Amino acid sequence: MKRPIVIWLLLAAGAAFAAERPADFAYGVTLEVDGKEALYEVTLPAATYRGVVRADLADVRVFNGAGEVVPHAWRPRRTAGTEAVASVALTLFPLKAEAGASLDGISIQVRRGPGGRSSVDVTSTSAGARKGAEQRTVGYFVDLTALDRALRAIEFEWQPVPDGFAGKLRVDASDDLGSWRTLVAAAPLVNLEVAGQRLQQKRVELPQHKVKYLRLSWLPQGTGAASPELVSASGEPVEKTVEAVREWAQAEPAKGEKPGEYLFDLRGRHPVDRVRLHLPEPNTVTQVELLARDKSEQPWRPFGRGVAYRLRRDGNEITSPELSVGVTTGRYWLLRVDQRGGGVGSGAPKLEAGWVPHTLVFAARGEPPFQLAYGNRDAKPAGYAIETLIPGYRDAGGSQIRAARTGPQQTTNVSSARALEQQELGGESRLKEAIDWKRWSLWGALVLGVLILGGMAWRLMRQLDAGANASSSKSPGKPE
């Protein structure tokens, strides 16, 4: 009797720890690769988020043509990036005044022509200013009103100076041409040549604040030292923040328990960080609150609030911007609309959720076709850290990955794999709670052991009772 029980336990344990197969997962997507690289990456299709069981994507695998699991890792997600902006040419307007006049004694006025061109009028307001007196350049004026970004630096060019120079430039800023504040007190500019070596410093770093006007002036130098004449300048704008491309899923509303409440089911575990609200009627303005949860029995958690509007103006519609909600994988959403002012009017709002999809990198080990499989409630985390899959990984925001190698550094290309249509593998049954054979085997063994011990105890008691009865039947009778 004991041998069949042991065999049954071993079979159950073996089934629990057997190697994973594509059929262990509910759905799959074939990945097209060109077969030229060792590493490929694929952006997760929206269907993946609707098919996974775990929000951390631990039930995602990549299989090769032989049905073997291949190593994979997740690239860090970037919800926003930066983009360099081309340098812009700046016009330098010389500020001229007679000897001894200060910059603070100069009045500046800007006039704009029909084509947006600027002209600058400079008037000396210093006491003792004389008409017709010889004037010299005491500084420069820069109009930045046409720029939509702040400057991070300015690079200058100047007239050649025979013996070179080393000076310091002061940079002041203003928004009204009346009051000026110092941005850079003494920026060194250098053009020297010593023993055939040239030392140049043409760049002035600026605080990254948006200003309308700049005023430049040389700080006084030693006796006889002449400052060069600036002939041109180019400004380097601050980098532009670029939002990552998002995918969007729209959900239809259902009425909630209270007036002004609307329920939405995204039918998946998308990493949502933006929400668009589409109001049913124009000329609507209302306050809203967004809540989410992963399961219907969980309490609602707030993720954002704001003002939603849809207004008509000059034949066009102006709608409220996207609401930022952090990052949540909640499937169910609740929209609460302030009922003051009539809420959203007749009809119901629609919700559109946006997310930055994950990017999976896998090693193309074995033969194609490769397959992305997902949806297995029993699956455990199997992904590597990106630095483990690719030692020395450095994300440059593109498809190039630099790997650490002994000797000269080499680059490893990561090619893109194309995801085809979703297909069913193991089906919906893989998403349901599976029988934990290991746990039930242990419980079964425990119950069986208790029954065996109980049977042994009962048998022992029967033997003891039988022995007692036999002893009493053989004993002599009592005297009368």
Image: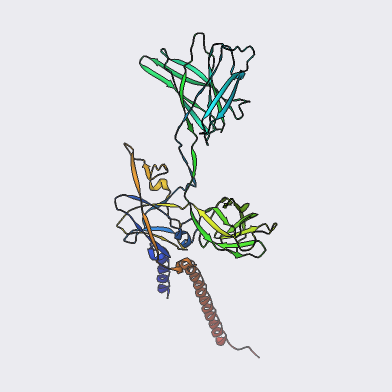
> Which of 79/68 is in front?
79
Residue 345 image offset from top left, x and y in percent? 65, 61
Whether residue 401 can be seen here: yes
Q: Residue at the location (68% across, 59% down)?
A: 342
- Name the image quarter holding residue 472: bottom right
For residue 15, side relative to residue 149 (left or right): left
Residue 380 image offset from top left, x and y in percent? 45, 58
For residue 12, side relative to residue 274 (left or right): left
> Which of 9/210 is in front?
210
Residue 389 image offset from top left, x and y in percent? 38, 48
> Which of 135/394 is in front?
135
Specify the color scheme. Answer: rainbow
> Which quadrant would the N terminus be assigned to in this image?
bottom left
Name above or below for residue 320 compared with residue 19: above
Whether residue 324 can be seen here: no
Q: Residue at the location (47% across, 18% down)?
A: 229
Name above or below for residue 86 compared with residue 333: above
Name above or below for residue 314 compared with residue 107: below
Q: Residue furthest front?
A: 114
> Which of 413/12 is in front?
413
